[in-house]
Image (tube, rainbow, N blue to C red):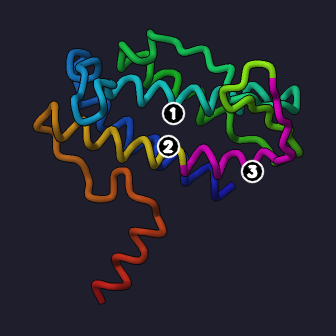
Amino acid sequence: MYLQQIIEDAFTELEGVLLQLSNEQYTAKSTHLFNATIGQHVRHIIELFQCLVNGYETGVANYDKRKRDITIENDTTTALLVMRDIIYGINKPSKPLMVEASFGMPNETIIIESNFTRELVYNLEHTIHHMALIRVGINELTDIVVSERFGVAPSTIQHREACAQ
């Protein structure tokens, strides 16, 4: 499916950056990111996808129930391995899903009707947003040069290209 390929391309771009980072850079706190680390943003991306992939079988995804696995945020090798698992895990046909969310209200859960494809779109947009934040951290903490497309929505790239002509 075309959408899965776009997600794989975004992950490939993110992997290319992670391969250039030391674990020290990956775990360094960024003042521009309110003391968050690049690794924490990567973990967040990964764990939302994990919630979706895990929810596929049950028909219920709950992004609030992330594991918050610190090995993903502290070790680039672990993050890269899990990202490859996600690429494999998203290659499924769409089907109806329910999304549970509490929005910080511990005794309140809302259930939203959705589907696997719609949630892949949500996760892709979420990934691009966090890649933009990761770019801020990279610019602050490293000398790594990232693509001018890194962390930029495809529609924004198309708009910029159209304006340049």
Distance of label 1 from label 2 (alpha carbons): 6 Å
Seen in the picture, residue 50 relative to 117 is either above or below; the reply is: above
The residue under label 3 is: 117
Amino acid at dot 1: Ile
Badge number at residue 45: 1
Q: Tell me whether circle 3 and circle 2 mark residues in contact (CB < 8 Å).
A: no
Question: Residue at 28% of width from left, 43% of height from top?
Answer: 135
Distance of label 1 from label 3 (alpha carbons): 17 Å
Q: Quadrant of residue 133?
A: top left
Question: Residue at 53% of width from left, 45% of height from top?
Answer: 126
Instruction: Mark 3 or mark 2: name the one nearer the start of the chain.
Output: 3
Callout 3: SS: helix
Amino acid at dot 3: Thr
Front residue of 81 and 127: 127
Highlighted magenta segment, given as a residue range: 108-125
Q: How far across and how far down the image is residue 81, in percent?
A: 48, 21
Q: Is residue 3 visible?
A: yes
Q: How far across and how far down the image is residue 29, in percent?
A: 25, 21
Q: Quadrant of residue 18?
A: top left
Q: Quadrant of residue 63?
A: top right
For label 1, the crowd category at 10 Å Cα-Cα, with few meaning under 14, some 14 to 19 and many 20 or more, is many
Instruction: Mark 1 or mark 2: name the one nearer the start of the chain.
Output: 1
The residue under label 2 is: 127
Distance of label 3 from label 2 (alpha carbons): 15 Å
